[in-house]
Image (tube, rainbow, N blue to C red):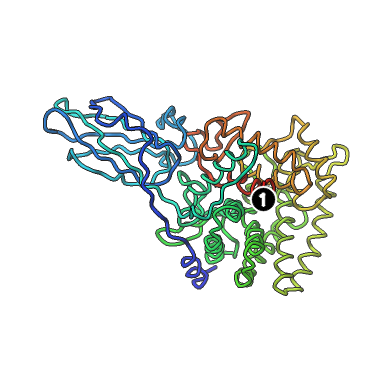
Amino acid sequence: MKKNLEFLSKALSLLPEVKETLVPPKEGQFFSKPLGKGDSVTIDFGKHLVGHLQVKMGYVNSHPDAPVWIRFSFAENLKEFEENVGNYQGWICSAWVQQEQLHFDLIPGEYTLPRRYSFRYVKIDILDISSKFNLVIEDVMAIALSSADDSKLKPYHNVHKELEQIDHIACHTLHDCMQKVFEDGPKRDRRLWMGDLRLQALANYETYQMNDMVKGCLYLFAALPMQNGQVGACVFLEPEPEVDDTSMFDYSLLFVAALWDYYVETKDREALEDLWETAKMQIVLAQKQVGVVKDCNKLGWCFLDWSLELNKQAGAQGVLLYAMKSAVAIAKEIGKDHDAECIMKTYELYRKAAKMHFYDEEKGLFVSGDCRQISYASQVWMILGDVVDEQSGIRILHDVATQTEAIEMITPYMYHYYIEALLKCGDKTEALSVMEKYWGGMARLGADTFWELYNPNNPDESPYGGTIVNSYCHAWSCAPAYFLRKYYSEK
Ligand code: RAM
């Protein structure tokens, strides 16, 4: 399908300006220390930030008679410095590792490094320098970038200080991912993904309230459909706005949920009417792909979580049901009664079929695939799709936690929907305790922004074949800002 130029220009006009803030490093003990070959200094900016780095360099002893060769390494998390990029053998491109080796011909001088980086720490290694002089770092400054409007952010109050801290970290995570679009992570992949957007938008409504930015991002996806009209899994903004050639069954469907959330928040009818056809198309395409219940390998890539062993059949069906509920709500709201009726009828059919096909009476849990796999993801998505009532839902969520063979959740993305399922079934206490354990676990490990992945049983887990390419500021992990402010606020 062709680009929709009208939507595209609307999208671009809605995207925010990115503002700059100067951030000095936390400590200045490295200033004026003479550095020779092999020396190294680590600079801590005191908090995670996204932006550019300026360095002012001088010298002591003889006039510089050769260039200086320096390696700059940037880290969101100090553990990135412990790893060697040369040893990384994973499948995702190692060019994401934030490192530069640069030659400086003129010292003294002031320089701005070439890329935008996502970091709290910067390590400077002097790879080579003439023996006739020493380098002196006279000043460093970060130019931090974000489009989040800090004046909109109200403080969150809770008697439990740990929860305030978790909220603070979640807001900081979202803040640093808010650039021209809602980026998934400013270190990697630095772009707008549909599944991530949906969660960022929810957290944004409770925090920065940059609702036009959400609208711009929704129009961007609608403006740049894939060949068959499917919303792509992610889009690029530069050099020209373009959809990626990756599609994901669940991410396309979450466009529908995100559009409905946006309307509930803003009552922006124009957007709902403009984007309805795109939303409806996602339901039509998904129905063609799965029908009532088909095997998940026919779905292409359905994400759900970064777990390689997870069987996605039941979860995918749950996401479809979940999106269909939003589609019905949108159609009703804009007077598309016939569409609403048709989708509702199919929804009922699919819901019954899902219960018959995936619910194992003996186990009292949902199973997925020929292997009848039990996982958290399958239970969560079947519950969110309303396949069982709330009472059964809560029993299922408690029971799955006692099953040692159940496939666990790995990403904060999947945990978001787990919390949503617990809240839907009325278990506010358990939802809070999961947040305290899971996001609190990252906080206790020193996170000042929340991570792309966190497996409490294996904090060094990476689906990419090495933690050096993991992102430690990933906005799909900003759920606590949404849930705490919406459901656990002391006003
Ligand atoms: C990761 C991205 C993004 C996510 C996709 C599926 O690579 O960083 O957050 O949406 O996977």
| Foreground pick, 375 / 401 | 401
Q: Residue at x 65, y 61 (%)?
A: 256
In which image quadrant can residue 391 be found? Answer: top right
Q: Residue at x 81, y 51 (%)?
A: 387
Question: Judging from the image, what secondary structure is the residue with disc 1 in?
Answer: helix
Q: Residue at x 60, y 40 (%)?
A: 164
**81 lies left or right of 169:** left
Which residue lies under the disc numbered 1? 486
Q: Is residue 271 in view? A: yes
The spot of residue 52 in percent (x, y) is: 35, 46
Q: Is residue 215 above or below residue 401?
A: below
The spot of residue 319 in percent (x, y) is: 70, 53
The spot of residue 394 in percent (x, y) is: 81, 42
Amino acid type, label 1? Lys
**169 lies left or right of 409:** left
| Foreground pick, 332 / 205 | 205
Circle 1 Cα neighbour tier, 10 Å, few/some/many (<14 / 14–19 / ≥20)? few
Screen quadrant of the N terminus: bottom right
Residue furthest out toward the right: 362
Numbered circles on residues, count: 1
| Foreground pick, 373 / 28 | 28
Q: Is residue 245 in view? A: no
Q: Residue at x 33, y 36 (%)?
A: 72
In which image quadrant can residue 375 be found? Answer: top right
Q: Is residue 40 above or below residue 239?
A: above
The spot of residue 350 in percent (x, y) is: 80, 57
